[in-house]
Amino acid sequence: MIDHVFDFIIAMALAGSMALMLARLFLGPTLYDRVLALNSFGTKTVLFLAVFSLMVGRGDGVDIALLYALINFIATIAILKFFRYRSLEIALSQMALRRALDQDDES
């Protein structure tokens, strides 16, 4: 009985922190704040899925949570790359050239 109460408290704390991340997502002043909030929301979702799957006694939900974590990571990198280069098809050599040009502009 005490385990279910503890699991419920953890699930509610995660749900509350997810609500705060959604508020930060919609109210963030910059793009990077919003991407960080989206990434944090995805991480909290992974934790919530893991806790919920353990609450209901099904361990296969942890596999789904891990898959969602991988998708969350790849999506965050893709979003940041898109907003940095305005394209997802930029080659690595072009990225190195742009970095070199940015360093020349700074000095």
Image: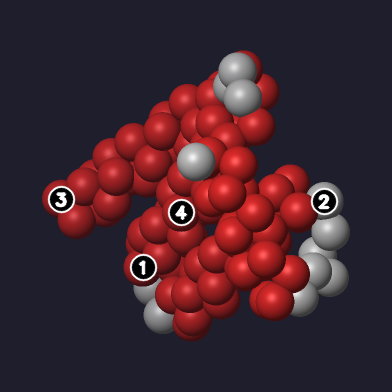
Residue 60, can we see it? Answer: yes
Q: Which numbered disc, 4 or 3, marks the residue that appears first in the sequence? A: 3
Mark in the foreground, 4 or 3: 4
Give the quarter of the image for residue 101: bottom right
Task: For mark 1, give the secondary structure.
Answer: helix
Total marks shown come to: 4
Which residue is at the front of the view, 78 or 92? 92
Q: Which numbered disc, 2 or 3, marks the residue that appears first in the sequence? A: 3
Q: How far separated are the C-alphas under marks 4 and 3?
A: 26 Å
Mark in the foreground, 2 or 1: 2
Q: Which residue is mark 1?
A: 54
| 19 up-or-down from 72: above or below | above
Q: Mark 4 is on which residue type?
A: Thr
Residue 1, can we see it? Answer: no
Q: Which residue is mark 4?
A: 43
Q: Mark 2 is on which residue type?
A: Arg
Q: Mark 1 is on which residue type?
A: Leu
Q: Mark 3 is on which residue type?
A: Ile
Give the quarter of the image for residue 93: bottom right
Q: Which residue is mark 2?
A: 86
Q: Which residue is mark 3?
A: 2
Mark in the foreground, 3 or 1: 1
Mark 1 closeness class: few <14, some 14–19, many ≥20 residues within 10 Å: some
Q: How far separated are the C-alphas under marks 3 and 1?
A: 14 Å
Residue 44, horizontal then vertical, whole percent: 44, 49
Residue 8, horizontal then vertical, whole percent: 32, 45
Q: How far separated are the C-alphas under marks 1 and 4?
A: 17 Å
Q: How far separated are the C-alphas under marks 2 and 3?
A: 52 Å
Q: How far separated are the C-alphas under marks 2 and 1?
A: 41 Å
C-beta proximity under 8 Å, tags 3 and 1: no
